[in-house]
Amino acid sequence: AEGAMRQMQKMDAVGQLTGGIAHDFNNMLSVVISGLQLLDKRLARGETDVQRYIDGALDGARRAAALTHRLLAFSRQQPLDPKVVEPGSLVAGMSELLTRALGERIETRIVAAAHLWRIHSDPGQLENAVLNLAVNARDAMPDGGRLTIDCSNVYVDEEEARCYDLPAGEYVTIAVADTGEGMSEEVVARAFDPFFTTKGVGRGTGLGLSQVFGFVRQSGGHVKIESAVDEGTTVRMYLPRYYGEEPGQRLPRAIDATLPH
Ligand code: ADP
């Protein structure tokens, strides 16, 4: 049943993705078509001053090409290669990379609870997800600010779990918080959509958060956004605790049975 669930989630993501692409691609095609129609009309009337219609059509075609390139990069996404991961060490190991990626005007803090649980996840993709979130945080703080990455152990109870479509139980959260411009409710509602971006042509791809979403769901977890305009944003990933065999470790069996691995 779990395999089927996974497959459905994958299909969901694919459906969402193709819907988003079809929409954007269609917009670009209509730019090309209307440019060529205008060109056709002007040429039929014997006009020669038609460069702008050619340029317009070319621009639309180039944008469509750029879109398919991004799509290819996206679909090359690696399948998960899960390992037992200590999330605190993984995030701590990124501190130099983060300093380089974020620049000097952003003060970065990494906080990890003592005795943080382990998780079973693809470490490379988890790093990518954290980096994606950190770069979004940087973009939301053009005048500088504070980035906090907080790793904690949490218990998700039945009620909360239902909201996240997860089994109740023990999770590690990795929260990436910024003191940036925040997001309106409308932006929060669409933020995980593939190709949704507010960053303007050439700057944002709109694929960062949808990749994070896909990765976290595939890992059996959840990701949510808490944001207030002009105050900041926290993106919180929930990843299921890993109960591995370890010499001398007592296994909390009651919860173990309900958690996917
Ligand atoms: P991109 O960064 O390429 O725009 P994402 O999928 O990563 O694509 O993000 C989608 C949108 O969500 C962004 O364009 C931005 O509007 C919003 N967003 C994401 N992270 C943050 C953040 N930390 N603060 C404010 N807005 C954010």
Image (cartoon, rainbow, N blue to C red):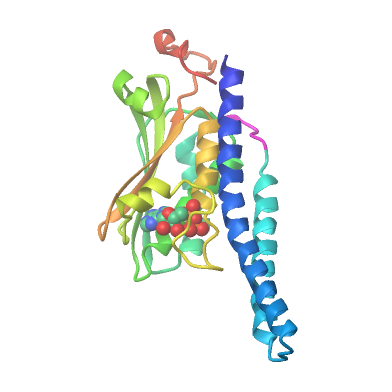
Horizontal and vertical percent for residue 218? 56, 31
User: Residue 191 vs residue 51: left or right?
Assistant: left
Report the residue at 45% width, 13% height from top: 258
Q: Which residues are magenta?
A: 79-83
Report the residue at 47% width, 10% height from top: 257
Q: Main secondary structure of the magenta part?
A: loop
Horizontal and vertical percent for residue 261? 55, 21
Direction top: furthest residue: 254
Residue 222 vertical placement versus 5 (above, below): below
Horizontal and vertical percent for residue 49? 68, 91
- The total of numbered circles placed on residues is 0
Q: Quadrant of the N terminus?
A: top right
Which quadrant of the figure shows ligand 1? bottom left
Residue 39 vertical placement versus 11 (above, below): below
Front-lying residue, 19 or 33: 33
Residue 236 vertical placement versus 258 (above, below): below
Q: Quadrant of residue 160?
A: top left
Front-lying residue, 86 or 79: 79
Direction front: furthest residue: 45
